[in-house]
Amino acid sequence: MQYFTGIDIGSTAIKIAIINEETELCAQTVVPTGSKFNENALNAYHALIRESHIDLSRIKYVVSTGYGRRLYKSADETVSEITANAVGATAVSKEHSIRTIINIGGQDSKIIQINQQGLVQNFIMNDKCAAGTGRFLEMASRNLEVDIDQMSGLHKLSQDRTLTVNSTCAVFAESEIISLLAEGHKKEEIVYGIHVSIAKRIARLAGRVKVQDDVLFDGGTAYNNGLVDALEEEFMRDFIVPGAPQITTAIGAAHMALDMCNKSRRNYSTSPRGQFI
């Protein structure tokens, strides 16, 4: 059996996916990025190989993607996270016809349009402000003194669904959250307002491209069912959330590694130097 690896090095997390030649997902991991991109990615990769009992010599191609893709020195190829996300979305949602991807990552958010062949047609990205990203949710959870995994449950407990967080800047929103707590608002009401605020920001971003069904929502924030509910209500449509939404882009990179390896074999030169042409 041969294996192919996708490594997605984001600003907050490193995601790794290993597939076999039948495109089956064989191993996956998510670890914090930290400050040493290459070292941390390499350590996480080798730990995953050991834990999965995969023979390193059977891994035939490695593709890196994401914010820190060029800092990972052991990759055979690097690709844009936009392209890898599109390939991954198609791979993990074969029963659907994905046309739009909404990806909310640690420090940016993206809207990606893809065609029937799974190719990127257009995209828009917000990477200038933390508002509407995973980092914003982390900040909010700290101020509310709740675990970020609790926010989905708190969202569903909210009785008052009129409260909103109006600040468009993450710094000002933090002050607004503290003020709302001081005024006696319940945490679940504030969480609901935060999710609605993020959904409205994403909708404004999506207004610059044409959102078409089916819509896939991925990134680590897609584990938050409260945010999913807020987005679906704002966009007035159902979203598709893959089983492991945080590694969609890494899976896409792994599929690209398989494809690149196959193409390389077809184009292999029979010259004495044995170079790829």
Image (tube, rainbow, N blue to C red):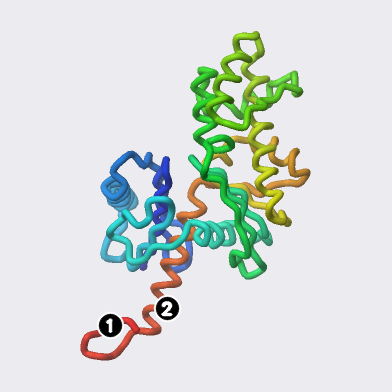
Instruction: Report x, y in % for residue 154.
Output: 63, 23
Instruction: Report x, y in % for residue 223.
Output: 56, 38
Instruction: Report x, y in % for residue 127.
Output: 52, 45
Q: Is residue 234 above or below residue 38?
A: above
Q: Quadrant of the N terminus?
A: bottom left
From the viewer's perspective, tell me whether residue 191 is left or right of residue 253: right
Give the residue at the far bottom of this rendering: 271
From the viewer's perspective, tell me whether residue 47 is left or right of residue 119: left
Instruction: Report x, y in % for residue 50.
Output: 28, 50
Identify the secondary structure beneath mark 1.
loop
Give the residue type that dot 2 points to.
Lys
Classify residue 228 by image quadrant: top right
Residue named by callout 2: 263
The residue at the point 46 percent across, 60 percent down is 80
Q: Which mark is residue 212?
A: none
Separation of marks 2 and 1 at Cα, in angstroms? 13 Å
Q: Is residue 181 above or below residue 82?
A: above
Give the residue type that dot 1 points to.
Gln
Q: Is residue 56 above or below residue 125?
A: below
Q: Which mark is residue 275?
A: 1
The residue at the point 31 percent across, 47 percent down is 37
